[in-house]
């Protein structure tokens, strides 16, 4: 027989040692560098995304509120509509309208004309003109205030604000037709309809002397701003409008990317929640400072009493969003603590999931057990779907509110609890399916 050659490296067979293990193989420097670089780069990218998102959250929220309030006619009307029911605002409007009518109509001159041919005694006429003029002015004031508090004026307020918002859009886009228009070096608001409505109501109440009172063209218009300011606003609008529209979604995307890149997602969830809560407090501080500056700016004017009400009403959507942001931040902090590896969170999670799975174990018979097996095999993406569903419910229609946040949170918790119960049922059914064949085999052998 030919002599066998010793096996070479290519022919060597792997062997399994049953003795003491030798020293563990350690990766060389190049292999360690290759393994660490992706992990380190991923962590750095996650930190950059979450920091950028945290810095941009407050500007994005304010810009999005401004963009929606300015561009969305229905949102703008819904924002300013409650102002007409404010006693402070009604008082300001009534005072302005009354003053305008009294300035347009010389009551004393009209009374003198009416009684000039009836009372020839001048001293008697002068004694009569004063009380009659005061009575007529009092009647004008009462009727104007009654009109301002009526449903008719509320409807007029809605129509005027709708047209004003649409007209302001045209001015910002370079068009100059409608209630708000560019005339010479000024942007003016035509209030002719408001004046006519008030005059018709006064005439219907018997004050016919204001029916044919001439109203100069300049008194029918309110100057909003000078033309040079419009050019600046148009430039800001052209560049800022697209940014304001997409900045908030971009911030949300940055948070999602940071969460997806994070190696420790529960910890990242806590960080995102803390940043959202901090930005909510920053928005609240900004609103508080802005309110005080706005009120101070109107001090000494006719609108001083209504300044705070006007500010709070105009920024109602932003203030509501601030409360939602704070609530969402606190929810995420609690969720990250619950899902983390900390001792207290692990204890609570273990106790809660154990109780839910025990409930599922008692329901493992029949169809529930079959459904539970499928849920247990797909529990990962089912939980993610529940989270996405909660987010959709929260932001649906761009009308987020604190009550909707709690309803969406309740929906998510109920669905997650149901998933965990079905997981318990599925595991019990699977264990029962393994045990029964073993018992049957044991009986056959016996």
Image (cartoon, rainbow, N blue to C red):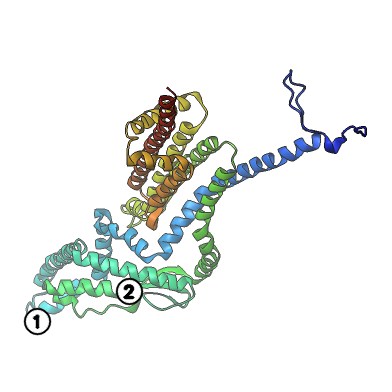
Query: Which quadrant would residue 77 be assigned to in this image?
Result: bottom left
- Density class for disc 1 (Cα within 10 Å; few <14, some 14-19, many ≥20) is few
Q: Quadrant of the N terminus?
A: top right
Element class at badge 2:
helix
> Going by the image, does 446 lie left or right of 27?
left
Front: mark 2 or 1? 2
Looking at this view, is 332 or 58 the one in front? 332
Quickly name the residue at label 1.
117
Query: Which quadrant would residue 34 be assigned to in this image?
Result: top right
- Residue sitting at x 51%, y 31%: 340
Label 2 or label 1, whichever comes before in sequence order:
1
The percent position of residue 336, horizontal first and vertical second, equals 48, 35
Quickly name the residue at label 2.
219
Residue that protrudes farthest toward the left in the picture: 118
Position of residue 24 relative to residue 366, above or below, is above
Callout 2–callout 1 Cβ contact below 8 Å: no
- Residue sitting at x 53%, y 47%: 256
Specify whether residue 76 is in view. Answer: yes
The percent position of residue 85, horizontal first and vertical second, equals 24, 57
The percent position of residue 331, horizontal first and vertical second, equals 42, 38
The percent position of residue 268, horizontal first and vertical second, equals 54, 38
- Density class for disc 2 (Cα within 10 Å; few <14, some 14-19, many ≥20) is some
Position of residue 380 relative to residue 348, above or below, is below
Q: Quadrant of the C terminus?
A: top left
Specify whether residue 291 is in view. Answer: no
Looking at this view, is 139 or 9 the one in front? 9
Position of residue 354 relative to residue 382, above or below, is above
Label at residue 288:
none
Residue that protrudes farthest toward the front in the picture: 1
- Marker count (numbered): 2
> Going by the image, does 445 lie left or right of 133?
right
């Amino acid at each position: 027989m030919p002599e066998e050659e010793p096996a070479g490296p290519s022919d060597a067979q792997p062997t399994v040692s049953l003795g003491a293990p030798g020293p563990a193989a350690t990766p060389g420097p190049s292999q360690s560098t290759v393994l660490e670089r992706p992990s380190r780069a991923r962590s750095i990218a996650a930190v950059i995304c979450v920091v950028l998102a945290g810095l941009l959250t407050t500007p994005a929220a304010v810009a999005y509120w401004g963009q929606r309030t300015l561009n969305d006619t229905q949102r703008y009307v819904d924002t300013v509509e409650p102002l007409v029911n404010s006693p402070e605002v009604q008082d300001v409007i009534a005072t302005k309208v009354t003053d305008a009518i009294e300035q347009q109509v010389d009551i004393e001159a009209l009374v003198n004309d009416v009684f000039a041919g009836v009372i020839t005694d001048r001293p008697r006429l002068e004694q009569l003109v004063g009380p009659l003029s005061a009575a007529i002015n009092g009647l004008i004031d009462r009727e104007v205030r009654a009109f301002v508090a009526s449903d008719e004026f509320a409807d007029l307020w809605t129509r005027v604000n709708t047209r004003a918002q649409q007209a302001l859009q045209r001015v910002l886009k370079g068009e100059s037709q409608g209630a708000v228009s560019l005339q010479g070096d000024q942007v003016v608001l035509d209030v002719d309809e408001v004046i006519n409505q008030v005059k018709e109501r006064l005439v219907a109440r018997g004050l016919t002397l204001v029916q044919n009172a001439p109203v100069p063209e300049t008194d029918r218009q309110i100057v909003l701003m000078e033309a040079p300011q419009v050019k600046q606003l148009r430039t800001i609008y052209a560049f800022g409008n697209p940014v304001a529209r997409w900045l908030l979604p971009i911030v949300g995307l940055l948070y999602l990317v940071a969460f997806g890149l994070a190696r420790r997602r529960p910890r990242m969830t806590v960080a995102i929640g803390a940043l959202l809560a901090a930005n909510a407090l920053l928005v609240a501080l900004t609103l508080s400072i802005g309110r005080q500056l706005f009120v101070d700016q109107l001090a000494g004017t006719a609108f001083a009493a209504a300044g705070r009400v006007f500010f709070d009403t105009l920024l109602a959507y932003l203030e509501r969003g601030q409360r939602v942001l704070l609530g969402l931040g606190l929810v995420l902090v609690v969720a990250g603590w619950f899902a983390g590896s900390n001792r207290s969170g692990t204890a609570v999670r273990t106790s809660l999931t154990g109780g839910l799975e025990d409930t599922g174990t008692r329901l493992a018979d029949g169809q529930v057990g079959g459904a539970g097996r499928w849920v247990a095999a797909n529990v990962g993406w089912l939980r993610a779907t529940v989270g996405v569903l909660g987010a959709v419910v929260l932001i649906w229609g761009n009308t987020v509110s604190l009550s909707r946040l709690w309803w969406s949170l309740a929906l998510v918790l109920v669905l997650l609890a149901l998933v965990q119960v079905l997981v318990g049922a599925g595991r019990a059914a699977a264990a029962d399916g393994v045990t029964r064949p073993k018992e049957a085999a044991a009986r056959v052998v016996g």
